[in-house]
Image (tube, helix red, strand yellow):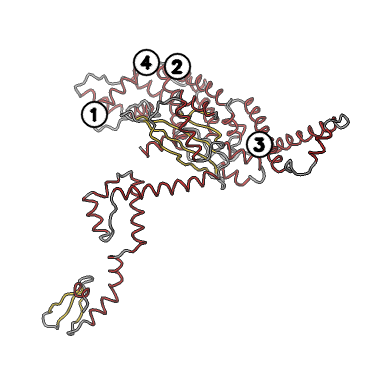
Amino acid sequence: MSRRSIRVTGLQKKPGSSWEVKCLLCLRELVYNNNTSTMLRHYRSLHVNVEATQENPGPDKNADIAELLVNMVVEDSQPFSFVEGTGFKKLFEALAPNYVLPTRKTLKAMVDKRYQETKEKAKAVVSKAQAVSITSDLWTSINTESFLAVTCHFIDESTSLQSVVLGVQHFTEAHSAVNLASTKTALMTEWGIRDKVTCLVTDGAPNMGACARELHLRHTTCVAHSLNLMVRKAMENSLEISAIRSNCRRIVGYFKSSTTAKLVQEVETRWNSTYLMFQRLYDLHEPVGAALAGLRTDIQPLSADTFTIIKDCLKVLEPFNQATTELSEEKRVSGSKVIPLLSMLHCSLEEEEIGMIQTAESREMAQFLRRQLRDKLNNIQSMSIMYLSTLLDPRFKKIGFFSPNQAVDAETRLISECAAIIRHHQSSSSPSPSTPSTSATQSVEQGSKLWHRFDATSQQTGTTNVTAGATMEVQAYLSEPNILRKSDPLKYWEQQKAVYPNLYKLAVAFLCTPASSVPCERALAHKI
Protein backbone atom coordinates (compact mmCIF):
# COMPACT_ATOMS: atom_id res chain seq x y z
CA MET A 1 0.00 0.00 0.00
CA SER A 2 1.34 3.50 -0.85
CA ARG A 3 1.96 6.09 1.79
CA ARG A 4 -0.95 8.15 0.49
CA SER A 5 -3.36 5.19 0.59
CA ILE A 6 -2.42 4.46 4.20
CA ARG A 7 -3.16 8.03 5.12
CA VAL A 8 -6.58 8.01 3.56
CA THR A 9 -7.84 4.58 4.62
CA GLY A 10 -8.44 2.84 7.94
CA LEU A 11 -8.76 -0.82 9.01
CA GLN A 12 -11.70 -1.92 11.14
CA LYS A 13 -13.45 -5.17 12.13
CA LYS A 14 -17.18 -5.40 11.52
CA PRO A 15 -19.17 -7.57 14.00
CA GLY A 16 -19.99 -10.92 12.43
CA SER A 17 -18.17 -10.13 9.23
CA SER A 18 -14.72 -10.03 7.69
CA TRP A 19 -12.26 -7.22 7.97
CA GLU A 20 -13.23 -4.10 6.13
CA VAL A 21 -11.60 -0.76 5.40
CA LYS A 22 -13.22 2.65 5.19
CA CYS A 23 -12.04 5.38 2.88
CA LEU A 24 -11.48 8.53 4.92
CA LEU A 25 -12.19 10.72 1.89
CA CYS A 26 -15.63 9.43 0.90
CA LEU A 27 -16.36 7.07 3.86
CA ARG A 28 -17.09 4.20 1.51
CA GLU A 29 -16.52 0.69 3.02
CA LEU A 30 -14.37 -1.82 1.14
CA VAL A 31 -13.67 -5.53 1.78
CA TYR A 32 -10.13 -6.22 3.02
CA ASN A 33 -8.55 -9.48 1.74
CA ASN A 34 -5.11 -9.21 3.33
CA ASN A 35 -3.87 -7.02 0.44
CA THR A 36 -4.18 -3.45 -0.75
CA SER A 37 -5.41 -4.04 -4.29
CA THR A 38 -9.01 -3.05 -3.63
CA MET A 39 -7.98 0.08 -1.73
CA LEU A 40 -5.53 1.22 -4.37
CA ARG A 41 -8.04 0.62 -7.15
CA HIS A 42 -10.65 2.67 -5.30
CA TYR A 43 -8.27 5.53 -4.51
CA ARG A 44 -6.82 5.77 -8.02
CA SER A 45 -10.21 5.70 -9.73
CA LEU A 46 -12.00 8.21 -7.49
CA HIS A 47 -9.59 10.38 -5.52
CA VAL A 48 -6.07 10.67 -6.87
CA ASN A 49 -6.85 13.34 -9.51
CA VAL A 50 -9.17 15.32 -7.23
CA GLU A 51 -6.75 15.42 -4.33
CA ALA A 52 -3.82 16.32 -6.56
CA THR A 53 -5.78 19.24 -7.97
CA GLN A 54 -6.74 20.47 -4.49
CA GLU A 55 -3.21 20.28 -3.12
CA ASN A 56 -1.53 21.62 -6.26
CA PRO A 57 -3.89 24.15 -7.86
CA GLY A 58 -1.51 24.79 -10.72
CA PRO A 59 -0.51 28.06 -12.39
CA ASP A 60 -3.95 28.78 -13.86
CA LYS A 61 -5.72 28.41 -10.51
CA ASN A 62 -3.12 30.54 -8.73
CA ALA A 63 -3.44 33.22 -11.40
CA ASP A 64 -7.22 33.26 -10.95
CA ILE A 65 -6.85 33.68 -7.19
CA ALA A 66 -4.32 36.50 -7.65
CA GLU A 67 -6.68 38.27 -10.07
CA LEU A 68 -9.55 37.99 -7.60
CA LEU A 69 -7.37 39.45 -4.86
CA VAL A 70 -6.53 42.46 -7.02
CA ASN A 71 -10.22 42.86 -7.92
CA MET A 72 -11.09 42.86 -4.22
CA VAL A 73 -8.64 45.70 -3.52
CA VAL A 74 -9.83 47.76 -6.49
CA GLU A 75 -13.59 47.24 -6.21
CA ASP A 76 -13.86 47.44 -2.42
CA SER A 77 -11.08 50.02 -1.84
CA GLN A 78 -9.32 47.64 0.55
CA PRO A 79 -5.95 48.54 2.11
CA PHE A 80 -2.96 46.47 0.99
CA SER A 81 -2.41 45.35 4.58
CA PHE A 82 -5.62 43.29 4.68
CA VAL A 83 -3.75 40.27 3.28
CA GLU A 84 -1.66 40.21 6.47
CA GLY A 85 -4.66 40.02 8.79
CA THR A 86 -4.90 36.93 10.98
CA GLY A 87 -8.55 36.26 10.19
CA PHE A 88 -8.03 36.66 6.45
CA LYS A 89 -5.08 34.24 6.53
CA LYS A 90 -7.19 31.64 8.35
CA LEU A 91 -9.97 32.05 5.81
CA PHE A 92 -7.56 31.54 2.91
CA GLU A 93 -5.94 28.58 4.62
CA ALA A 94 -9.33 26.90 4.72
CA LEU A 95 -10.34 27.85 1.16
CA ALA A 96 -7.00 27.52 -0.64
CA PRO A 97 -4.47 25.94 1.74
CA ASN A 98 -1.73 25.64 -0.90
CA TYR A 99 -1.95 29.22 -2.19
CA VAL A 100 0.76 31.49 -0.81
CA LEU A 101 -0.75 34.88 0.06
CA PRO A 102 1.25 37.85 -1.22
CA THR A 103 2.69 40.41 1.18
CA ARG A 104 1.29 43.93 1.17
CA LYS A 105 4.30 45.06 -0.90
CA THR A 106 3.72 42.35 -3.49
CA LEU A 107 -0.01 43.07 -3.58
CA LYS A 108 0.70 46.75 -4.20
CA ALA A 109 2.91 45.80 -7.13
CA MET A 110 0.13 43.59 -8.49
CA VAL A 111 -2.40 46.43 -8.26
CA ASP A 112 0.05 48.87 -9.88
CA LYS A 113 0.54 46.43 -12.76
CA ARG A 114 -3.23 46.11 -13.22
CA TYR A 115 -3.55 49.92 -13.17
CA GLN A 116 -0.94 50.36 -15.91
CA GLU A 117 -2.49 47.63 -18.07
CA THR A 118 -5.98 49.12 -17.71
CA LYS A 119 -4.68 52.62 -18.38
CA GLU A 120 -2.94 51.56 -21.59
CA LYS A 121 -6.13 49.87 -22.81
CA ALA A 122 -8.12 53.03 -22.03
CA LYS A 123 -5.54 55.18 -23.83
CA ALA A 124 -5.85 52.99 -26.91
CA VAL A 125 -9.63 53.51 -26.92
CA VAL A 126 -9.42 57.27 -26.32
CA SER A 127 -6.81 57.70 -29.07
CA LYS A 128 -9.40 56.62 -31.65
CA ALA A 129 -11.90 59.32 -30.60
CA GLN A 130 -12.50 62.13 -33.09
CA ALA A 131 -13.57 64.62 -30.43
CA VAL A 132 -13.91 64.60 -26.65
CA SER A 133 -15.45 66.64 -23.85
CA ILE A 134 -13.97 66.73 -20.37
CA THR A 135 -15.49 67.35 -16.95
CA SER A 136 -13.50 68.51 -13.94
CA ASP A 137 -14.14 68.93 -10.23
CA LEU A 138 -12.07 69.89 -7.20
CA TRP A 139 -12.78 68.46 -3.76
CA THR A 140 -11.29 69.42 -0.40
CA SER A 141 -11.49 67.14 2.64
CA ILE A 142 -12.03 68.22 6.25
CA ASN A 143 -8.25 67.84 6.60
CA THR A 144 -7.83 70.48 3.84
CA GLU A 145 -6.43 67.91 1.42
CA SER A 146 -7.50 68.68 -2.14
CA PHE A 147 -8.06 66.30 -5.04
CA LEU A 148 -8.66 67.15 -8.69
CA ALA A 149 -10.65 64.76 -10.89
CA VAL A 150 -10.85 64.91 -14.68
CA THR A 151 -13.07 62.66 -16.81
CA CYS A 152 -13.27 62.33 -20.57
CA HIS A 153 -16.39 61.67 -22.66
CA PHE A 154 -16.52 60.73 -26.34
CA ILE A 155 -18.46 58.81 -28.97
CA ASP A 156 -16.55 55.78 -30.23
CA GLU A 157 -16.37 54.13 -33.64
CA SER A 158 -19.58 52.18 -33.00
CA THR A 159 -21.42 55.44 -32.15
CA SER A 160 -21.64 54.60 -28.44
CA LEU A 161 -21.04 57.09 -25.63
CA GLN A 162 -17.93 56.27 -23.59
CA SER A 163 -16.47 57.79 -20.41
CA VAL A 164 -12.95 57.41 -19.02
CA VAL A 165 -11.44 58.78 -15.80
CA LEU A 166 -8.24 60.53 -16.88
CA GLY A 167 -7.04 60.99 -13.34
CA VAL A 168 -7.80 61.74 -9.69
CA GLN A 169 -4.77 63.63 -8.42
CA HIS A 170 -3.72 64.97 -5.05
CA PHE A 171 -3.72 68.73 -5.65
CA THR A 172 -1.27 70.48 -3.33
CA GLU A 173 -0.91 73.80 -5.16
CA ALA A 174 -3.04 76.90 -4.71
CA HIS A 175 -6.42 76.57 -6.45
CA SER A 176 -5.60 79.23 -9.03
CA ALA A 177 -6.68 79.09 -12.65
CA VAL A 178 -3.06 78.84 -13.80
CA ASN A 179 -2.30 75.85 -11.55
CA LEU A 180 -5.53 74.09 -12.52
CA ALA A 181 -4.84 74.70 -16.19
CA SER A 182 -1.29 73.36 -15.85
CA THR A 183 -2.48 70.09 -14.29
CA LYS A 184 -5.26 69.63 -16.84
CA THR A 185 -2.89 70.37 -19.72
CA ALA A 186 -0.49 67.70 -18.47
CA LEU A 187 -3.35 65.16 -18.29
CA MET A 188 -4.69 66.05 -21.74
CA THR A 189 -1.18 65.81 -23.22
CA GLU A 190 -0.54 62.47 -21.55
CA TRP A 191 -3.77 61.06 -22.98
CA GLY A 192 -3.23 62.62 -26.41
CA ILE A 193 -6.44 64.67 -26.49
CA ARG A 194 -5.08 68.23 -26.25
CA ASP A 195 -6.35 69.13 -29.74
CA LYS A 196 -9.56 67.08 -29.53
CA VAL A 197 -11.37 68.78 -26.62
CA THR A 198 -14.60 70.48 -27.70
CA CYS A 199 -15.83 71.59 -24.25
CA LEU A 200 -14.94 71.70 -20.54
CA VAL A 201 -17.79 71.19 -18.05
CA THR A 202 -17.27 72.31 -14.43
CA ASP A 203 -19.17 73.84 -11.55
CA GLY A 204 -19.69 77.59 -11.41
CA ALA A 205 -16.59 78.45 -9.35
CA PRO A 206 -14.75 81.50 -10.76
CA ASN A 207 -11.39 79.70 -10.84
CA MET A 208 -12.89 76.94 -13.00
CA GLY A 209 -14.18 79.46 -15.55
CA ALA A 210 -10.83 81.26 -15.53
CA CYS A 211 -9.09 77.90 -16.03
CA ALA A 212 -11.15 77.25 -19.19
CA ARG A 213 -10.13 80.68 -20.54
CA GLU A 214 -6.51 79.89 -19.71
CA LEU A 215 -6.83 76.65 -21.71
CA HIS A 216 -8.70 78.43 -24.55
CA LEU A 217 -11.53 75.90 -24.34
CA ARG A 218 -15.28 76.24 -24.67
CA HIS A 219 -16.71 76.20 -21.17
CA THR A 220 -20.15 75.40 -19.81
CA THR A 221 -21.33 75.30 -16.23
CA CYS A 222 -22.85 72.15 -14.74
CA VAL A 223 -26.61 72.61 -15.18
CA ALA A 224 -27.44 70.63 -12.04
CA HIS A 225 -25.29 73.04 -9.99
CA SER A 226 -26.94 76.01 -11.71
CA LEU A 227 -30.43 74.79 -10.88
CA ASN A 228 -29.37 74.17 -7.30
CA LEU A 229 -28.08 77.75 -7.00
CA MET A 230 -31.30 79.09 -8.55
CA VAL A 231 -33.43 77.35 -5.94
CA ARG A 232 -31.23 78.56 -3.08
CA LYS A 233 -31.30 82.17 -4.28
CA ALA A 234 -35.08 82.04 -4.70
CA MET A 235 -35.53 80.71 -1.15
CA GLU A 236 -33.08 83.15 0.37
CA ASN A 237 -34.93 85.96 -1.38
CA SER A 238 -37.92 85.32 0.96
CA LEU A 239 -37.41 86.05 4.65
CA GLU A 240 -40.43 83.92 5.56
CA ILE A 241 -39.20 80.86 3.65
CA SER A 242 -35.69 81.32 5.06
CA ALA A 243 -37.13 81.28 8.58
CA ILE A 244 -39.12 78.12 7.77
CA ARG A 245 -35.98 76.43 6.47
CA SER A 246 -34.10 77.34 9.63
CA ASN A 247 -36.86 75.94 11.86
CA CYS A 248 -37.09 72.77 9.76
CA ARG A 249 -33.34 72.23 10.11
CA ARG A 250 -33.65 72.50 13.91
CA ILE A 251 -36.50 69.97 14.01
CA VAL A 252 -34.68 67.49 11.77
CA GLY A 253 -31.45 67.94 13.75
CA TYR A 254 -33.26 67.24 17.02
CA PHE A 255 -34.92 64.05 15.82
CA LYS A 256 -31.90 62.80 13.90
CA SER A 257 -29.81 62.98 17.07
CA SER A 258 -32.35 61.51 19.49
CA THR A 259 -34.56 59.08 17.57
CA THR A 260 -34.69 56.94 14.47
CA ALA A 261 -37.16 59.19 12.61
CA LYS A 262 -36.65 58.97 8.84
CA LEU A 263 -36.17 62.68 8.28
CA VAL A 264 -33.78 64.30 5.79
CA GLN A 265 -31.46 67.11 6.82
CA GLU A 266 -30.70 69.96 4.45
CA VAL A 267 -27.09 69.98 3.24
CA GLU A 268 -25.64 73.05 1.55
CA THR A 269 -23.69 71.12 -1.08
CA ARG A 270 -26.23 68.37 -1.73
CA TRP A 271 -28.65 68.96 -4.55
CA ASN A 272 -32.35 68.91 -3.77
CA SER A 273 -31.75 68.41 -0.05
CA THR A 274 -34.06 71.34 0.80
CA TYR A 275 -36.83 69.84 -1.32
CA LEU A 276 -36.33 66.41 0.29
CA MET A 277 -36.31 67.94 3.79
CA PHE A 278 -39.59 69.76 3.13
CA GLN A 279 -41.15 66.69 1.53
CA ARG A 280 -40.30 64.33 4.38
CA LEU A 281 -41.44 66.79 7.05
CA TYR A 282 -44.70 67.38 5.20
CA ASP A 283 -45.34 63.64 4.84
CA LEU A 284 -44.61 63.06 8.55
CA HIS A 285 -46.04 66.32 9.92
CA GLU A 286 -48.63 64.60 12.15
CA PRO A 287 -46.27 62.21 14.03
CA VAL A 288 -43.54 64.87 14.18
CA GLY A 289 -45.97 67.45 15.58
CA ALA A 290 -47.33 64.99 18.14
CA ALA A 291 -43.81 64.04 19.23
CA LEU A 292 -42.74 67.67 19.67
CA ALA A 293 -45.86 68.43 21.70
CA GLY A 294 -45.08 65.60 24.12
CA LEU A 295 -41.36 66.31 24.52
CA ARG A 296 -39.56 68.82 26.68
CA THR A 297 -37.91 70.97 24.04
CA ASP A 298 -37.87 74.65 23.12
CA ILE A 299 -38.39 73.79 19.42
CA GLN A 300 -41.77 75.04 18.27
CA PRO A 301 -43.90 72.69 16.10
CA LEU A 302 -44.69 73.92 12.60
CA SER A 303 -48.06 75.60 12.30
CA ALA A 304 -50.80 74.79 9.80
CA ASP A 305 -50.02 78.00 7.85
CA THR A 306 -46.37 76.98 7.68
CA PHE A 307 -47.28 73.58 6.26
CA THR A 308 -49.43 75.31 3.62
CA ILE A 309 -46.37 77.32 2.54
CA ILE A 310 -44.26 74.15 2.50
CA LYS A 311 -46.91 72.39 0.39
CA ASP A 312 -46.86 75.22 -2.16
CA CYS A 313 -43.04 75.27 -2.17
CA LEU A 314 -43.04 71.57 -2.98
CA LYS A 315 -45.34 72.21 -5.96
CA VAL A 316 -42.94 74.82 -7.28
CA LEU A 317 -39.80 72.81 -6.63
CA GLU A 318 -40.97 69.38 -7.80
CA PRO A 319 -40.07 69.98 -11.51
CA PHE A 320 -36.63 71.22 -10.43
CA ASN A 321 -36.11 68.08 -8.40
CA GLN A 322 -37.09 65.94 -11.40
CA ALA A 323 -34.81 67.93 -13.71
CA THR A 324 -31.68 67.74 -11.55
CA THR A 325 -32.28 64.05 -10.83
CA GLU A 326 -32.75 63.28 -14.52
CA LEU A 327 -29.62 65.17 -15.57
CA SER A 328 -27.50 63.67 -12.80
CA GLU A 329 -28.57 60.09 -13.52
CA GLU A 330 -28.41 60.37 -17.30
CA LYS A 331 -26.10 57.74 -18.79
CA ARG A 332 -26.83 58.65 -22.39
CA VAL A 333 -26.52 61.91 -24.33
CA SER A 334 -27.41 64.73 -21.94
CA GLY A 335 -25.87 68.05 -23.06
CA SER A 336 -28.40 68.34 -25.88
CA LYS A 337 -31.19 68.07 -23.32
CA VAL A 338 -30.28 71.24 -21.39
CA ILE A 339 -32.15 73.82 -23.51
CA PRO A 340 -35.37 71.74 -23.87
CA LEU A 341 -35.33 70.84 -20.17
CA LEU A 342 -34.91 74.44 -19.01
CA SER A 343 -37.65 75.46 -21.44
CA MET A 344 -40.01 72.94 -19.85
CA LEU A 345 -39.07 74.22 -16.39
CA HIS A 346 -39.94 77.72 -17.53
CA CYS A 347 -43.29 76.45 -18.83
CA SER A 348 -44.00 74.91 -15.41
CA LEU A 349 -43.76 78.44 -13.98
CA GLU A 350 -46.13 80.13 -16.41
CA GLU A 351 -48.45 82.78 -15.01
CA GLU A 352 -51.46 80.46 -14.89
CA GLU A 353 -49.47 77.87 -12.97
CA ILE A 354 -48.23 80.47 -10.50
CA GLY A 355 -51.78 81.76 -10.09
CA MET A 356 -52.84 78.38 -8.67
CA ILE A 357 -50.40 78.73 -5.74
CA GLN A 358 -52.20 79.78 -2.56
CA THR A 359 -49.51 81.49 -0.49
CA ALA A 360 -47.87 84.79 -1.39
CA GLU A 361 -44.42 83.61 -0.25
CA SER A 362 -44.46 80.64 -2.64
CA ARG A 363 -45.77 82.77 -5.52
CA GLU A 364 -42.95 85.23 -4.96
CA MET A 365 -40.42 82.38 -5.00
CA ALA A 366 -41.92 81.00 -8.24
CA GLN A 367 -41.74 84.40 -9.95
CA PHE A 368 -38.13 84.82 -8.83
CA LEU A 369 -37.27 81.39 -10.25
CA ARG A 370 -39.02 82.23 -13.51
CA ARG A 371 -36.91 85.36 -13.99
CA GLN A 372 -33.72 83.44 -13.24
CA LEU A 373 -34.66 80.68 -15.67
CA ARG A 374 -35.32 83.18 -18.46
CA ASP A 375 -31.88 84.76 -17.91
CA LYS A 376 -30.22 81.33 -17.84
CA LEU A 377 -31.99 80.24 -21.01
CA ASN A 378 -30.97 83.37 -22.87
CA ASN A 379 -27.38 82.77 -21.82
CA ILE A 380 -27.31 79.06 -22.70
CA GLN A 381 -29.07 79.54 -26.04
CA SER A 382 -26.24 81.86 -27.07
CA MET A 383 -23.61 79.12 -26.49
CA SER A 384 -22.76 77.24 -29.68
CA ILE A 385 -21.89 74.00 -27.85
CA MET A 386 -25.40 73.95 -26.38
CA TYR A 387 -27.59 75.01 -29.29
CA LEU A 388 -25.71 72.90 -31.85
CA SER A 389 -25.99 69.79 -29.68
CA THR A 390 -29.75 70.43 -29.27
CA LEU A 391 -30.20 70.87 -33.01
CA LEU A 392 -28.17 67.71 -33.71
CA ASP A 393 -30.27 65.64 -31.31
CA PRO A 394 -33.02 64.00 -33.40
CA ARG A 395 -35.28 63.99 -30.34
CA PHE A 396 -35.38 67.79 -30.13
CA LYS A 397 -34.06 69.58 -33.26
CA LYS A 398 -35.74 73.01 -33.61
CA ILE A 399 -38.72 72.33 -31.36
CA GLY A 400 -36.42 71.99 -28.36
CA PHE A 401 -35.63 75.71 -28.33
CA PHE A 402 -37.18 78.24 -25.99
CA SER A 403 -36.97 80.97 -28.65
CA PRO A 404 -38.00 80.28 -32.30
CA ASN A 405 -35.63 83.03 -33.46
CA GLN A 406 -32.74 81.29 -31.73
CA ALA A 407 -33.67 78.05 -33.49
CA VAL A 408 -33.35 79.83 -36.87
CA ASP A 409 -29.96 81.27 -35.90
CA ALA A 410 -28.83 77.83 -34.75
CA GLU A 411 -29.83 76.33 -38.10
CA THR A 412 -27.76 78.96 -39.92
CA ARG A 413 -24.75 78.17 -37.73
CA LEU A 414 -25.23 74.42 -38.30
CA ILE A 415 -25.19 74.97 -42.08
CA SER A 416 -21.96 76.93 -41.70
CA GLU A 417 -20.37 74.15 -39.62
CA CYS A 418 -21.53 71.53 -42.12
CA ALA A 419 -20.07 73.54 -45.02
CA ALA A 420 -16.74 73.76 -43.16
CA ILE A 421 -16.71 69.94 -42.85
CA ILE A 422 -17.34 69.61 -46.61
CA ARG A 423 -14.60 72.11 -47.48
CA HIS A 424 -12.15 70.34 -45.17
CA HIS A 425 -12.96 67.01 -46.81
CA GLN A 426 -12.47 68.49 -50.28
CA SER A 427 -9.16 70.11 -49.39
CA SER A 428 -7.82 66.94 -47.75
CA SER A 429 -8.78 64.80 -50.77
CA SER A 430 -7.47 67.25 -53.42
CA PRO A 431 -4.00 66.76 -55.04
CA SER A 432 -1.02 67.99 -53.02
CA PRO A 433 0.77 71.20 -54.12
CA SER A 434 3.76 69.19 -55.32
CA THR A 435 1.59 67.25 -57.76
CA PRO A 436 1.49 68.77 -61.26
CA SER A 437 -1.95 70.30 -61.54
CA THR A 438 -3.75 73.47 -62.47
CA SER A 439 -2.18 75.26 -59.50
CA ALA A 440 0.96 76.05 -61.51
CA THR A 441 -1.11 77.35 -64.41
CA GLN A 442 -3.27 79.43 -62.08
CA SER A 443 -0.24 81.05 -60.47
CA VAL A 444 0.96 82.15 -63.93
CA GLU A 445 -2.44 83.37 -65.01
CA GLN A 446 -3.20 85.28 -61.82
CA GLY A 447 -1.23 88.18 -63.22
CA SER A 448 -3.35 88.26 -66.33
CA LYS A 449 -6.44 90.48 -66.34
CA LEU A 450 -7.89 88.46 -69.22
CA TRP A 451 -9.03 85.55 -67.00
CA HIS A 452 -9.47 87.45 -63.73
CA ARG A 453 -13.27 87.68 -63.89
CA PHE A 454 -13.62 84.02 -64.95
CA ASP A 455 -11.36 82.76 -62.13
CA ALA A 456 -13.22 84.83 -59.52
CA THR A 457 -16.58 83.57 -60.76
CA SER A 458 -15.34 79.98 -60.76
CA GLN A 459 -14.10 80.27 -57.18
CA GLN A 460 -17.38 81.85 -56.08
CA THR A 461 -19.33 79.06 -57.79
CA GLY A 462 -17.34 76.45 -55.85
CA THR A 463 -18.12 78.19 -52.57
CA THR A 464 -21.79 78.43 -53.49
CA ASN A 465 -21.92 74.71 -54.29
CA VAL A 466 -20.45 73.82 -50.88
CA THR A 467 -22.97 76.02 -49.07
CA ALA A 468 -25.82 74.63 -51.15
CA GLY A 469 -24.76 71.07 -50.37
CA ALA A 470 -24.57 71.83 -46.65
CA THR A 471 -27.97 73.54 -46.74
CA MET A 472 -29.59 70.58 -48.47
CA GLU A 473 -28.14 68.11 -45.95
CA VAL A 474 -29.22 70.17 -42.93
CA GLN A 475 -32.72 70.86 -44.26
CA ALA A 476 -33.25 67.22 -45.20
CA TYR A 477 -32.29 66.18 -41.65
CA LEU A 478 -34.49 68.81 -40.00
CA SER A 479 -37.46 67.95 -42.22
CA GLU A 480 -37.54 64.38 -40.90
CA PRO A 481 -39.94 63.67 -38.00
CA ASN A 482 -38.33 63.78 -34.57
CA ILE A 483 -37.66 60.44 -32.91
CA LEU A 484 -39.32 59.67 -29.56
CA ARG A 485 -37.97 61.60 -26.55
CA LYS A 486 -36.91 58.42 -24.73
CA SER A 487 -35.13 56.99 -27.78
CA ASP A 488 -31.36 56.87 -28.04
CA PRO A 489 -30.13 59.60 -30.43
CA LEU A 490 -26.84 57.79 -31.03
CA LYS A 491 -28.66 54.77 -32.46
CA TYR A 492 -30.33 57.14 -34.90
CA TRP A 493 -26.97 58.56 -36.01
CA GLU A 494 -25.44 55.10 -36.35
CA GLN A 495 -28.25 54.22 -38.77
CA GLN A 496 -28.15 57.54 -40.65
CA LYS A 497 -24.41 58.23 -40.86
CA ALA A 498 -24.34 57.25 -44.54
CA VAL A 499 -27.35 59.49 -45.29
CA TYR A 500 -25.96 62.55 -43.46
CA PRO A 501 -22.18 61.94 -43.41
CA ASN A 502 -21.16 65.52 -42.59
CA LEU A 503 -23.80 66.02 -39.90
CA TYR A 504 -22.74 62.67 -38.42
CA LYS A 505 -19.24 64.05 -37.85
CA LEU A 506 -20.71 67.11 -36.14
CA ALA A 507 -22.98 64.92 -34.00
CA VAL A 508 -19.96 62.91 -32.83
CA ALA A 509 -18.20 66.15 -31.87
CA PHE A 510 -21.07 67.91 -30.09
CA LEU A 511 -23.25 65.18 -28.57
CA CYS A 512 -20.47 63.89 -26.31
CA THR A 513 -20.75 66.92 -23.99
CA PRO A 514 -22.44 66.00 -20.68
CA ALA A 515 -24.95 68.34 -19.05
CA SER A 516 -23.33 68.16 -15.62
CA SER A 517 -20.05 67.47 -13.85
CA VAL A 518 -21.61 64.57 -11.94
CA PRO A 519 -19.27 62.01 -13.62
CA CYS A 520 -16.35 63.77 -11.93
CA GLU A 521 -18.07 63.83 -8.56
CA ARG A 522 -18.76 60.09 -8.88
CA ALA A 523 -15.07 59.52 -9.60
CA LEU A 524 -14.11 61.52 -6.50
CA ALA A 525 -16.66 59.70 -4.34
CA HIS A 526 -15.37 56.33 -5.52
CA LYS A 527 -11.65 57.08 -5.37
CA ILE A 528 -11.38 58.99 -2.11
Q: CA distance from mark 2 to mark 3?
A: 40 Å
Query: Which quarter of the picture shows residue 298?
Result: top left
Quarter containing the C terminus: top left
Which residue position holds label 2? 364
Closer to the camera in the image, 514 or 524: 524
Amino acid on which the number 1 mark rests in the picture: Ser
In the displayed structure, does residue 56 sit left or right of residue 477?
left
Residue at position x 67%, y 30% in the image: 412
Location of residue 107 in the rendering, given as x and y in whole percent from the top left corner: 32, 49
- Find the residue positioned furthest to the left: 15
Secondary structure beneath label 4: helix
Residue at position x 81%, y 36% in the image: 442
Instruction: Name the front one of labels 1 and 4.
Output: 1
Amino acid on which the number 2 mark rests in the picture: Glu
Which residue position holds label 4? 240
- Work out whether mark 1 precedes mark 3 in sequence or the reverse, and give the earlier one: 1
Which residue position holds label 3? 478
